[in-house]
Amino acid sequence: MSHQPPSPAEGNLLFPVFLKIDLLQILLVGGGYVGLEKLQALLKNNPNAKITLVGKTIRPEIRQLAALHPSVWLLEKGFDPDDLHGIDILILATDSRQTNACIRALAKQQGILTNVADTPELCDFYLGSTVKKGDLKIGISTNGKSPTFAKRFRELLEEGIPDEVDLLLHNLQQLRSTLHGDFQEKVKLLNAYTASLVAQAAPKPDEVP
């Protein structure tokens, strides 16, 4: 028996937001493999992210990574409710679902947005896969259904988007700063120029493998 896919109105209702995490205080609880994975994801997106990592034990790889990023603080201890003071975003990556749930409940009382590793139903947000080419960044979400698919799709986009796209963005920024006059006319000119740049960057038929 086949299942019908959800209608567009029932599909992914998440709202994508790009945060300036170097201006926010992030608490990451868990110093194991999952904590390492979350820390790597955050720093990959912004090497200056302000992160405090709390864990009873902290993996050597985490220490090595933190040593390269002055904005990362490591606290080798158990979680304390006072750790939530002044926190904007909480990421829970301990190996105990019960511990994660208890901390999440405390954070909810304080209105702190929380991500709980491998527990979509307790998440206020997900850490989606991202594709980055210079100033271009694309977020990918499967609505928590398949992180593996999101990873594979990210790899596909990374291979398909030319590195020259960053130069295209630079040229558009330069053009935008020189345009004057009616807003609609500026939009029309930018759209035409964008179409031209994309056409130039697209691979020729004989270049497609």
Image (cartoon, rainbow, N blue to C red):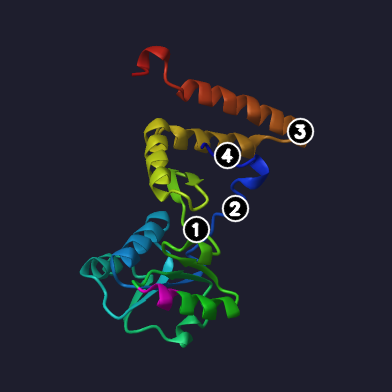
Q: Which residue is mark 4?
A: 5
Instruction: Provide residue 78's location: percent of width, then percent of height.
Output: 35, 84
Instruction: Provide residue 119's location: percent of width, then percent of height.
Output: 45, 63
Residue 198, above or below 26: above
Q: Which residue is mark 1?
A: 126
Amino acid carrying label 1: it is Tyr
Q: Are marks 2 and 4 in contact (CB under 8 Å)?
A: no
Q: Which residue is mark 2?
A: 14
Q: Which residue is mark 3?
A: 184
How many neighbours does mark 4 have within 10 angstroms: few (below 14), some (14-19), or many (20 or more)? Answer: few
* Magenta residues (range): 96-100
Report how far apart the C-alphas of labels 4 and 1 lie in the structure.
22 Å
Amino acid carrying label 2: it is Leu
Amino acid carrying label 3: it is Gln
Which numbered disc flags the more N-terminal residue, 4 or 1?
A: 4
Q: Are marks 2 and 1 in contact (CB under 8 Å)?
A: yes
> In the current view of this chain or complex, which residue is farthest to the top?
206
Report how far apart the C-alphas of labels 2 and 1 lie in the structure.
9 Å
Which numbered disc flags the more N-terminal residue, 4 or 3?
A: 4
